[in-house]
Amino acid sequence: MLISPSLVRLKIDSLCREKHGAVRPRCRLRGIARSLSLHFVFGAGASYGAGGCLPSPPPLGPGLYPALQSSFAATWGSLPEKYASLYAAYYEDGMAAVWQEHSEWVPALMRDMAVFFARYRLDGHGNDCYSRLIKGLAANGRLDEADFATTNYECLFDEALTVAGRNVCYGPQPRVGWTTLWKLHGSCTFTVQGIKLQPGAAVYTSGATFHGNGIELIARTDVERYCATSGLYPCMSLYAPGKPNQMARAMIESMQLEWASRVAAEGIVVIIGLAPHPPDSHIWSRLASTPATLYYVGAEEPFAQWARANREGREARWLAPTFEASLPDLLALE
């Protein structure tokens, strides 16, 4: 069922979780005017480098396929050599080939991927970089002014917010008094609302899209049960070129558009652990064109190359190679 933009907005407005449920040298951020909007964008490198995570840091892109292969022998571990070698060389190429040639394999692979990412959780000590960033922003009086976006499927930052006593709104429209977190590529805890499909009840092609009546949030601890009893998979973009969406596509794209409109204004955008990848134009074209000042945490040279090619005449500043190393600067926001 294709739903109208108005219905998309009405449904997703309620997608909130209450708290109980030219590149410049490294610089200081001190003294930035509070009137400027403050946006954070997290990638896989943020969770990988955050620390304080169980059972281990979530893998970066090159380590994802080996981790899935060893964890799920019946699905990821039994792919034909043609596809296994593509995944091993570059994950997105493997996913693109399966999507185009064997889309009937995708639901089982994505269900197991959701189960994989749902296993990650904070260790509860509050020493991870996510929790320390939230505490620091709160202490500086900037947390209520900030919004956040992530491309990660897991829920480490979501958990850090709820532990800190914040109500989380997943957008696209912010909600007064709540912290906005746009999950630009979906989440292992997002499910299609209004569609029930038994396992094996249907085989669907790469062109099939399940909109339903919106997105329904489930608990991280319920993801494995959902995946074992549903013929659908959680609303997660495929980790393939363009990050296509099969589950709740209109919802995910609505989140992306609202986030893009927010970062299109003057302000500050802090990018942490998200490698420049221009083919993901829904993110990187927006970051290229924004008049906001960009601050980057991650490998310096790839960001420098991207900024030289895409940010001429606009501020783009590298801060530090890791999340941990960047915290003194990030927490100097006044």
Image (tube, rainbow, N blue to C red):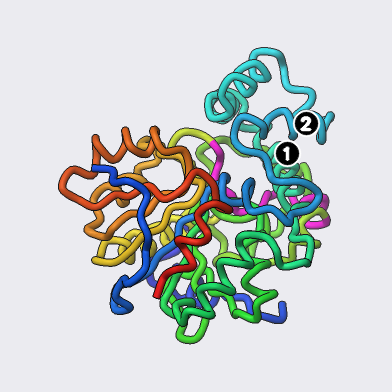
Residue 5, given in percent of the width and then of the height, sits at: 38, 66
Q: Residue at label 1?
A: 108
Label 2 secondary element: loop
Q: Nearer the viewer, residue 49 or 206?
A: 49
Q: Nearer the viewer, residue 83 or 149?
A: 149
Q: Counting residues from the N terminus, which is met first, the one under dot 2 or under dot 1?
A: 2
Q: Is residue 229 magenta?
A: yes
Residue 317, given in percent of the width and then of the height, sits at: 32, 50
Tell me what residue is drawn at x 58 percent, y 53 percent: 324
Q: Residues within 10 Å of mark 2 (few under 14, many from 20)?
A: some
Tell me what residue is drawn at x 82 percent, y 50 percent: 228
The quarter holding residue 257 reads bottom left
Vertical placement of residue 178 versus 313, above or below = below
166 left or right of 149? right
Q: Can residue 254 be spotted in the picture?
A: yes
Residue 297, given in percent of the width and then of the height, sits at: 46, 49
258 left or right of 45? left
Report the amino acid beneath label 2.
Thr
Q: Residue at label 2?
A: 75
Q: Is residue 130 magenta?
A: no
Dots 2, 1 in contact, CB < 8 A: yes
Vertical placement of residue 124 versus 22, above or below = below
Residue 264, given in percent of the width and then of the height, sits at: 27, 61
Magenta span covers which residues? 225-239
Label 1 secondary element: helix
Q: What secondary structure is the stretch in magenta mostly built from?
A: loop
Quadrant containing the C terminus in the rendered view? bottom left
Label ID, residue 189: none
Q: Nearer the viewer, residue 198 or 18?
A: 18
